[in-house]
Amino acid sequence: MRQFCLTSVARFCSSIFLFLGPCVCVHPVLAQKQDVTLSLGGVFSQSRSFQGTGTAQISSDFDLEANYGYRFLHANIAALYGEIEFVALPNRSVTSAAAIVPKNYASLYVAPGLRLKFAPAARISPWVAIGGGYALYQQSAQFSNGLNTTNKFLNRGLFDFGGGVDYTLFRFLGLRAEVRDLVSGNPNLNVALSSSTQHNLISSGGIIVRF
């Protein structure tokens, strides 16, 4: 079941790098108005309650992230960026003693938004971000009882918010640590859930390239 997840994520990540790759080749004449961040991290495990009785346990997983930012406004105290956040979670297993659920699922998130960065000229700069966009869920080919599934893909809306800290190593290079919550409609767990939304809390760290 893991192969279908990794194949989807590999295609997704290839598309991201094809999109972002030409950006990092831009001449520094742009005065560092743009940045690209590539990150690795993880999503926390969680428990989902059913309508009535029962729960499903969704495992933690590593995540792959890419972020493109463009600075619109700049002042000594803060700078405002537009951004596009990409997140891929390749394989979250699902278990339940009370229902037949998919064995696992993969998820992809794309969230345009805004990032407000404080003390942008300092070596350490905290920031907050908010946005919204699109979530794609792909469940495994089989349920937990071994039967085949028919509806593998599900599209959902997405709300993204979080914050982090950027650390400048050199003029064009830095490090980033962040925490985000990707709030989406529910993945298809083959059972009615008590809430219509799912929080996907991720924590990650990565490398920033400015140009």
Image (tube, rainbow, N blue to C red):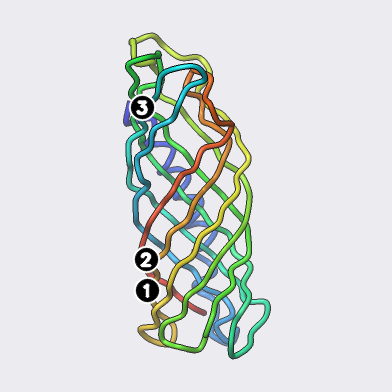
The amino acid type of the residue labelled 3 equals Val
* Disc 2: which residue: 206
Q: Give me the C-alpha separation between circle 2 and circle 3.
A: 28 Å
Quarter the N terminus occupies: top left
Q: Earlier in the sequence, mark 2 or mark 3?
A: 3
Per the image, label 3 sits on a secondary structure element best described as strand
Q: Quadrant of residue 70?
A: bottom right
| Disc 3 crowd, CA 10 A, few/some/many (<14, 14-19, 20+) | many
The amino acid type of the residue labelled 1 equals Leu
| Disc 2 crowd, CA 10 A, few/some/many (<14, 14-19, 20+) | some
Identify the disc placed on residue 175.
1
Which one is in front, 41 or 68? 41
* Disc 3: which residue: 94
Q: Quadrant of residue 5?
A: top left
Which one is in front, 190 or 52? 52
Q: Residue 186: horizontal and vertical position, in percent?
A: 54, 32
Per the image, label 2 sits on a secondary structure element best described as strand
User: Mark 1–mark 2 contact, CB under 8 Å?
Assistant: yes
Q: Give me the C-alpha separation between circle 1 and circle 2.
A: 6 Å
Q: Earlier in the sequence, mark 1 or mark 3?
A: 3
Per the image, label 1 sits on a secondary structure element best described as strand
